[in-house]
Image (cartoon, helix red, strand yellow):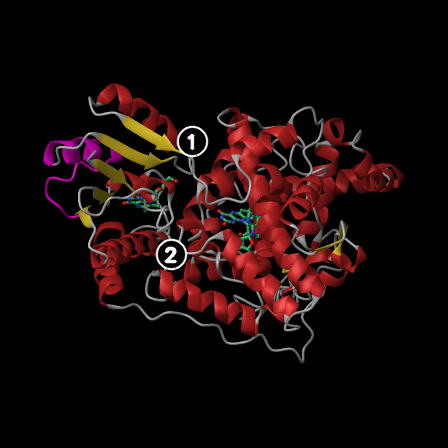
Amino acid sequence: MRTLRFVLGDQLSRGLSALADLDAERDVVLLVEVHEEATYVRHHQQKIALVLSAMRHFADDLRAEGVAVDYVRLDDPDNTGSFTGELGRALLRHAVDRVVVTEPGEWRVFERMQSWSHAFDTPIEIREDDRFLCSHRRFEAWAKGRKALRMEYFYREMRRETGWLMREGDPEGGRWNFDPENRRALPRDVAPPARLRFPPDAITREVMALVADRFGDHFGELDRFGWAVTRSDALRALADFIAVALPRFGDYQDAMQRGEDFLFHALLSPCINIGLLSPREVCEAALSAYAKGEAPLPAVEGFVRQILGWREYVRGLYWLRMPGYAATNFLEASRPLPDFYWTGETDLRCLRETIEGTRRNAYAHHIQRLMITGNFALLAGIAPAEVEAWYLIVYADAFEWVELPNTHGMALHADGGLLGSKPYAASGAYIDRMSDYCGPCMYSPKSKLGEGACPFNYLYWYFLMENERRLAGNPRMAMPYRTLARMSLERREEIARQSREFLAGLDPR
Ligand code: FAD
Ligand code: DLZ
Ligand code: SF4
C-alpha cells in the first residue's frame, strides 16, 4: 500500500506515529510551508524561522535516510497557503492508496483535518500523537468524576505510574514537593551560566531572509536567533542544560534579574514542542543526573514536575475541555490589551524588562510570563482573548494546546478555577522580592497609594474589590478579603480612584 505521510511543523520527530510503519521504498513524506500557519496569528519572527528551518532540516534528515520527501516551500508560486490546499495539490502529484497523519496539537487544525475525509477521495488515517507521557484516554479516566482537576494529584499519579523519583511506593526524599526550597531570589554573588545558543547555519539564514521579507512587520527581533533547529543540536542543548543549569534550576526557578534573560531555565520548550526532543528523554536525562549525584533532588523533582506534571496536565485539560474552554470569561474582563505589550514602552520597569526580553528572544521564563505580564493583565482586567492572542504570538514555544491553559486558566483565572484554585494575583512586594526590577523603576514597591506608588499595589486591592462577588467565597482568598474588610472606606475609595485613573490611561484614545 503506497502511503502519503503528512507531517506538520510541530511534528518533527522521527518516531512520530504517522511515520511508524514508513516504507522508504514506496511512501512519500509530505511537509508544507504555508502562509496560513504563519499568519493565523502574527507570530514572532523567530518562531516562524524556528519552525520553517527545523522543517527543512528534518526533510533533509529523512532524505539522507533514503526517504522520498515532497517539500513545498513558502515561495513556491503555486502554494495555496493552507494545509488543506496543499494536501489537495499533493494528492494530484502522487498516486497513493491512503494518507496518514498524526493528530495535530491545536483544535483549529484538528477541525480542518476532520473535514479531509469528505474533501478528498483518498482515505485519511488520523493517528494518535503518542509523544506525550499521558494519552487522552488516560487523562479522561483520571479526570472522570473529579470536582477539581488539580495538577498536584495528576502529577502524583504520573509519578507512581512512571516510577520516576519513587522509592518503594513513596516519593524520593519523603516529599512530593520541594517548592519551599525552590523559591529564592538570585543572590548578588551567583552568576547564571553562559548558555549554548546556535548560530544560524545556511538553511536558517535562508529562512531568516524569507521571514524578514514576508513577515518583517511581525513582532520581535530576528537577528538574535539562536534556537536549535536539528535533532542533534537539540540533544546538545539538553546536555548543556543538564550540565550547567539543572543543578541550580530549583533554587532560582522563580527569580528574575535584569540583563539575565535565561537564568537557570532549560530553554528547551521550543525543541520539545516541535518534536526535536521527547518529554520522556528530557526527564530521563535529569533523572540520570540525579542518579549520578550531579544534580540535587529539589532541582530534579522541580524540573520533572514541570514536564511530567504541568506539561502533560495542560495538554490533557486542553483536549478535555476544548472548544468550550477558550470561551469562558469568569472574571468578565474586557479591557483592550495596552499597546505597550507590543512596544515595551512603559514606565513599569518589570513589564518593560520582560517585554523587551520577549522581543529579543521570543522567550520569557515562567515567572515573567505568570507574575509580570500575566499578573498585570489579570489585575488590569484585560480581555482573555486579547491576552491569549498575545501569548500565542510572542513566544517561540507557543502552541495553543499549551499556551491556552497556561494563559486562560493559570494566569487569568478565566476558567473560574478549573486549573488553579485561586488567581495568581500579586502586588509589587512579590516582584520586589523575586527580582531587581524595582530599584531603577520610577515607582516604589514600598509605596501603596499616592504619587510614586507601584501600580501593582493599588491594582491588586482594586482587583479584589471589583471581583468580590466572584472571589470572596473562595476559601483560599479568605485572608486577603479579611484584610480588605478591615480597610477604611476612605482608603478603599482612594484605591479605586487611583486605579481607575491609571487604567483609563491605558485605554486607546
Ligand atoms: P523551564 O522553566 O526550564 O521548564 C522546563 C520545561 O518544563 C519546559 O521546557 C516546558 O516543556 C515544561 N514546562 C514548564 N512549565 C510549564 C507549564 N506551565 N506548562 C507546560 N509546560 C511547562 N509553555 C510552552 O511550552 N508554550 C507556551 O505557549 C506557554 N505559554 C505560557 C503562558 C503563560 C501565561 C504561562 C504562565 C506559562 C506558559 N508556558 C508555556 C509555560 C512555561 O512558562 C514555559 O514552558 C517555559 O517558560 C519554557 O521555558 P524553559 O524551556 O526554559 O522552561
Ligand atoms: C507555527 C507554524 C508555522 C509558522 N508555519 C508552519 C508551516 O508552514 N507548516 C507547518 O506544517 N506548520 C507550521 N507551523 C506549525 C503549525 O502551526 C502546527 O503544526 C499546528 O498549529 C498544529 O499544532
Ligand atoms: Fe514593577 Fe512596581 Fe517594581 Fe516598578 S515598582 S518594577 S512597577 S513591581
Question: Is 223 on the left-hand or right-hand side of 415?
Answer: left
Decide which of 128, 225 is in the foreground and name it. Answer: 128
Gap in Å between the C-alphas at discs 2 and 1?
A: 26 Å
Contact between labelled residues 1 and 2, with CB atoms less than 8 Å apart: no
* Labelled disc at residue 123: none
* Nearest-to-viewer mark from 2 and 1: 1
In percent of width and height, residue 488 lies at 87, 40
Residue beneath the point at 60% across and 52% down: 306
In percent of width and height, residue 431 lies at 68, 58
Per the image, the residue denoted by label 2 is 220
Decide which of 162, 217 is in the foreground and name it. Answer: 162
Decide which of 179, 351 is in the foreground and name it. Answer: 179
In percent of width and height, residue 90 lies at 16, 36
Decide which of 502, 78 is in the foreground and name it. Answer: 78
Q: Is residue 342 above or below residue 117?
A: below
Residue beneath the point at 58% across and 63% down: 286
Q: Type of residue at label 2?
A: Gly
Query: Dot 1, crowdedness within 10 Å: few (<14), some or many (≥20)?
Result: some
Question: Where does the magenta region start and end?
Answer: 74-93
Q: Is residue 437 above or below residue 47?
A: below
Judged from the image, the quadrant occupied by ligand 3 is bottom right
Per the image, the residue denoted by label 1 is 107
Query: Splitting the image into 4 quarters, where does residue 467 fall?
Result: top right
- Element on which disc 1 rests: helix
Looking at the rendered image, the quarter that the N terminus falls into is top left
Residue beneath the point at 26% across and 39% down: 5
Query: Dot 2, crowdedness within 10 Å: few (<14), some or many (≥20)?
Result: many
Check the image and name the residue furthest to the right. 486
- Element on which disc 2 rests: loop
Q: Is residue 59 magenta?
A: no
In percent of width and height, residue 436 lies at 65, 68
Question: Is 377 on the left-hand or right-hand side of 106?
Answer: right
